[in-house]
Structure formats: C-alpha cells, structure tokens
Amino acid sequence: MKGSEPMHVITPTDDNVIATAAAEMTGLASPSRGSTELSTWKVGIEPDTAGPKHVIDREQVWTVTAGALEVVAEGRTEQVREGQTLVVPAGVLRVFRTTDQAAEALVAMAVGGRAFLPGDDTGQPVPWAQ
C-alpha cells in the first residue's frame, strides 16, 4: 500500500480538448492532471473518418462507448462496437476509422507514450496524454 497520496478528481475543461483532422480528444487522467502511471482520454470521431496510419509505443485499451470503430492493425481488421473493448499492443501499425456513424471511445495507456508515423524514428508525445 502506498503512502498517503491524495486522490484527484478531474473535471474536463475546454483546455483539455485537442482536435485533430481525424478526431477530438478530451484528456482525462494524465501526469499534468495528477496521474502518475496511467493516461486516459475520450475520443470522438465523426462518420466516414479515418485517422492516420501510426504506431504507439505503449499498449492501449480502447472501450467503445458509442457507435463503432473499424481498426486495421498489422493487416488484420476488427469491428469494435459499443460496449466492446479492444487491446492494441505496443508497436503495432494501426489505423482507426468510422463508417456511416460517429463513434466515441475511452482510451487508457501507460504514461509516456509516443506516436510514430511511418518513416519517423523519433516520434512525438501524445499531447492529450501528457
């Protein structure tokens, strides 16, 4: 059992929302908001939208809370529907997309994750997980 570390209640604000060309991420738990080991965020993706092909160097757990996602990872395609959870291993080239409906998901990842686009050896921090 750890010492007397305080609990943290996190209330998302507009400052915690980052929009990309493919989705809107709302940062929840992260080091900048009081978490030391785990980052979590909410993802909202509009219909008929695909994210970029990329790799994350940490395992991610995606729980779809609305709609459905189609995920292609290492040549394998999975449909993940509302109420289902997908575990994506670290280091796997993946792309997430929606079809004719929007989707929302909650994502969890160990802190310190970096994203890599194909051909990028340095990567970049995942901003909503910082």
Image: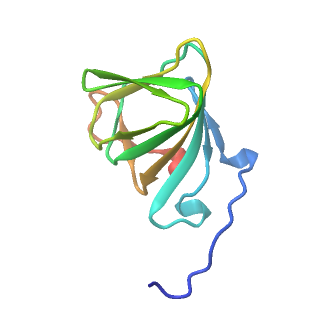
Q: Quadrant of the N terminus?
A: bottom left
Q: How many callouts does the rendering have?
A: 0
Can residue 83 be seen in the rendering of this structure?
yes
Q: Give the camera-side residue of 114 and 84.
A: 84
Can residue 130 be seen in the rendering of this structure?
no
Q: Residue furthest front?
A: 83
Q: Residue at x 58, y 11 (%)?
A: 100
Q: Residue at x 61, y 62 (%)?
A: 33
7 lies left or right of 86: right
Q: Position of residue 89 (x, y in %)?
A: 30, 42
Q: Quadrant of residue 42?
A: top right
- Can you say whether 32 is above or below 60 in the image? below
47 lies left or right of 79: right
Q: Give the camera-side residue of 3 and 34.
A: 3
Q: Position of residue 18 (x, y in %)?
A: 62, 38
Q: Residue at x 56, y 87 (%)?
A: 4
Q: Position of residue 67 (x, y in %)?
A: 59, 25
- Can you say whether 110 is above or below 23 in the image? below
Q: Position of residue 128 (x, y in %)?
A: 55, 46
- Can you say whether 20 is above or below 28 in the image? above
30 lies left or right of 61: right
Q: Give the camera-side residue of 79 and 119.
A: 79
Q: How is the image coloured?
A: rainbow
10 lies left or right of 5: right
